[in-house]
Amino acid sequence: MPDRMIESPALPPAYARIPWLKRLSTKMLILTAISVLVAEVLIFIPSVANFRLRWLEERLNTAAATAVLLIGTDSVSLPRNVQDDVLKALGAKAVAVRSGGDSRLLVVSEMPPQVDEHVEPSAVGPFRAIAGALDTMVYGGDRTLRVFGMVGDSDKEFELIMPDQGLRKAMLVYARNVALLSLIISFITAALVFGAINHIMIRPVLALRGAMVRFAEAPDDPSRIIHPGNRADELGAAARELEGVQTQLQRTLAGQAHLVNLGLAVSKINHDLRNILASAQLISDRLRMVKDPSVQAFAPKLVRTLDRAVAYTENVLSYGRAQEAPPSRRKVRLRQLVEEVEGLLGIDPAAGIEFENAIDHAFEMDADAEQMFRVLSNLCRNAVQAMSGDSDSSVVRRLTISAERQGSVSRIIVMDTGPGLPPKARDNLFAAFRGSARSGGTGLGLAIAHELVRAHGGTLELVESAGGRTVFALSVPDQPVLLEEARHALRRPA
């Protein structure tokens, strides 16, 4: 079918657990039947009022026709049994005619002591007709009516004195027939409307619900993703949106599962790696005793690097298993920190990659030194790896780190002359396992850097990425001053 929304027509097992009266289809059927019945009631009341007036007009017309025949006859000489037959046929007690101000009784059986209501059918308005009809049906049956009016082109006014018992009985029969017909029409209409609504709305909604239930049972199964059809209405749009949400959720779950597996693998490796690094520390300590000047030049850097590696293993790469520890912020000399990053990168002079530390010697920032070291080392390592892939010696390969103060915010610029980030890496810039710019990369470097910067209350953004220029901007605000602590410090004696 062209408007098919989900390939599987079977309803989910959970649907059978919904009580019949609480199902959407049952509510729609009941609501449709009630709506049609209300419409029929609104039509029924004016219909009964109109029936009452037509019934009285028919009796008045019959009485007028009889009166025309009796006008030329002396009613006194008319036999009693004939008068009774005429009145019985009319359901009346008296028939009179008024002409030129004179009123004449043509046929009479007995005159009632009083007349309860005077009705001129041709002059009754709609609201008065409805009120009269309801009054007759509820309270009538023992009243006397005077029905009068002109009939056709006659200049005479005819009058009919009659009880309303016959009128009320006829109205009740008519109301019963109309009510039965209304019920039949309402259920037929409700069935037709329900069938249309069920096909257009309810079944697609149930299909959407079934798709969500099936996906929830196994969200990692690609076959459980909804397959929307080509409907152009709101339900079609909702199905396509649901498909997008399920697809994105499945990708997210796959990434989370990858992170869980990574954390487990790191935990297994960490124990042995820590022992190896401990042995390396012992060896580095012995290197300090060597009197060779070249050894004394690189030994402190080696010791510092091993100390950092041991610290990282102690945290079991906290990104893979939990959140990073809150930053322990102090005043940091940024140029010296960048020099340590340069030493850790170990750039081969033959590679032709220039490292430019453009930070002023007096520049200080408020940050956690170890976490900021990790941020800069990840950014710089990515830049070096990107530029290492170019073997053309005429191409400029330079990594520049600069910094400036903007009020209370430290802004660090990391710029390289590499080939730039591919579109996939830009679209998933800080997403682990999806934001890597090179084949085989994990994208964890940028993800870790982004998390650490956010822990400082700062931002890490890609300012520019094009062939020959990639710029990352790192902004870290100074930590706010606690007023109570500042006041207390100022009150202390020097």
Image: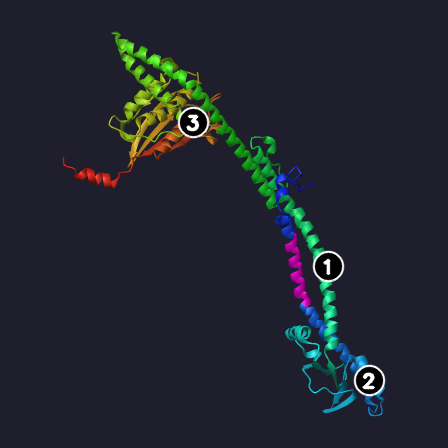
Circles 3, 1 touching at the beta carbon (< 8 Å): no
Q: Residue 158 appears in which quarter of the rendering?
A: bottom right
- The Cα atoms of the two marked residues, 1 and 2, are separated by 42 Å
Find residue 235 and report its horizontal and vertical position in percent: 60, 44
User: Mark 3 or 2 closer to N-term?
Assistant: 2
Mark 3 belongs to which amino acid? Arg
The residue identified by callout 1 is 184
- The Cα atoms of the two marked residues, 3 and 2, are separated by 108 Å
Side (left or right) of 332 relative to 28: left
| Residue at (32% x, 14% y) in the render | 281
The residue identified by callout 3 is 321
Find residue 248 and report its horizontal and vertical position in percent: 53, 34
Q: Nearer the viewer, residue 39 or 239?
A: 39
Side (left or right) of 333 relative to 88: left
Numbered disc 1: secondary structure: helix
Q: Look at the image and tell me whether residue 231 can be seen.
A: no
Coloring basis for residues: rainbow
234 above or below 253? below
| Residue at (58% x, 42% y) in the render | 238
Q: Nearer the viewer, residue 326 or 476?
A: 326
Q: Look at the image and tell me whether residue 484 can be seen.
A: yes
User: Mark 1 or 2 closer to N-term?
Assistant: 2
Which of the image's four quarters has the N terminus? top right
- The Cα atoms of the two marked residues, 3 and 1, are separated by 68 Å
Find residue 182 and report its horizontal and vertical position in percent: 71, 62
